Image (cartoon, helix red, strand yellow):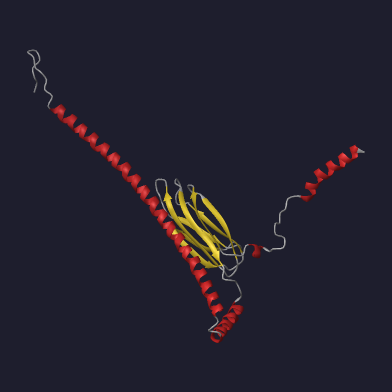
Amino acid sequence: MLCRVACWFLFCVLWGPVLGGPTTNLHPNITDQQLFWGSDQYDFSVVLRAAGMECFWHFAHRGERFYLSFMVQWVTGMGQDRHLSVTVNAPGGLLVSKVDEAQGQVNFEAEETGFYQMCFNNFHNRFGSMQIFLSFGVYYDGYKDAATRKEEEKKKKEEASRDLNNTLSIVEAATHKVEKYTFHMFRYYSFGRMRKSADYFLLQSNSQYISWWSTALSLLIVTSGYLQLLFLKRLFISKTCTETEKPRC
């Protein structure tokens, strides 16, 4: 009897996790659009190796604004070409935007819902790497079709003309405006951080360049001065003459 109970207990313990399995859907009652809905942004730096490429994906809904800002901070190698090839592809695979500069901004209205692909290619530098600073994201004002938007705008104008003294609606509209302006202010602030970091790395690179060349030129001047003195000294060397050894013309 005890042997049967022990076997049954081991069967339940070992067979339970197999039947359960890992949970693949953490939110079964939430759609993808509801799960990814919201305004978000990301700021970080990434190093691209020589002739390398890095791609990132970000979710956006149809009708909302997608933005991307980038700047090359430093470049290594002999050529030191600061150009960066940037492409943005829609979820369906269509090319939305392409930029080939050291810094730039991409801003467009999403035509379809899904993950937008951003690829950064360093094919200009075959023998040197580069570090780039990225800032991208989306901001939502609430997507609705054109007809609904026009109807709501018309209703809002009528309500505004009727209820000019509605303090609550005025405060709510002002709050939304402040939130929107604050969001864009942080966007421009992140772009200013890009420029500041790029200038810092440029100053650091120039300082090392000047230090190395100053040291090399100082050694060259000292060496050339020593060689000149040695050559002039050899011109004034006189040999003592004896009876057997006479100076020759």
Tell me: residue 198, above or below residue 95.
above
Q: Residue drawn at (19%, 29%), measured in percent from left and top?
A: 230
Residue 212, how many percent across, how many down?
32, 41
Q: Residue drawn at (50%, 59%), measured in percent from left and top?
A: 135
> Considering the image in quadrants, where does the N terminus appear?
top right
Residue 67 or 95: which is nearer the viewer?
Answer: 67
Residue 135 or 123: which is nearer the viewer?
Answer: 135
Q: Residue drawn at (13%, 28%), measured in percent from left and top?
A: 235
Residue 160 or 223: which is nearer the viewer?
Answer: 160
Q: Judge left or right: residue 137 versus residue 233.
A: right
Residue 182, how many percent across, how many down?
49, 67
> Considering the image in quadrants, where does the C terminus appear?
top left
Residue 156, how many percent across, how many down?
57, 81
- What is the total number of numbered labels drawn onto the structure image? 0
Tell me: residue 164, above or below residue 203.
below
Residue 13 or 137: which is nearer the viewer?
Answer: 13
Q: Residue drawn at (40%, 56%), measured in percent from left and top?
A: 196
Q: Judge left or right: residue 61 versus residue 101.
A: right
Q: Judge left or right: residue 47 versus residue 80.
A: right
Q: Is residue 12 visible?
A: yes
Q: Is residue 102 visible?
A: no
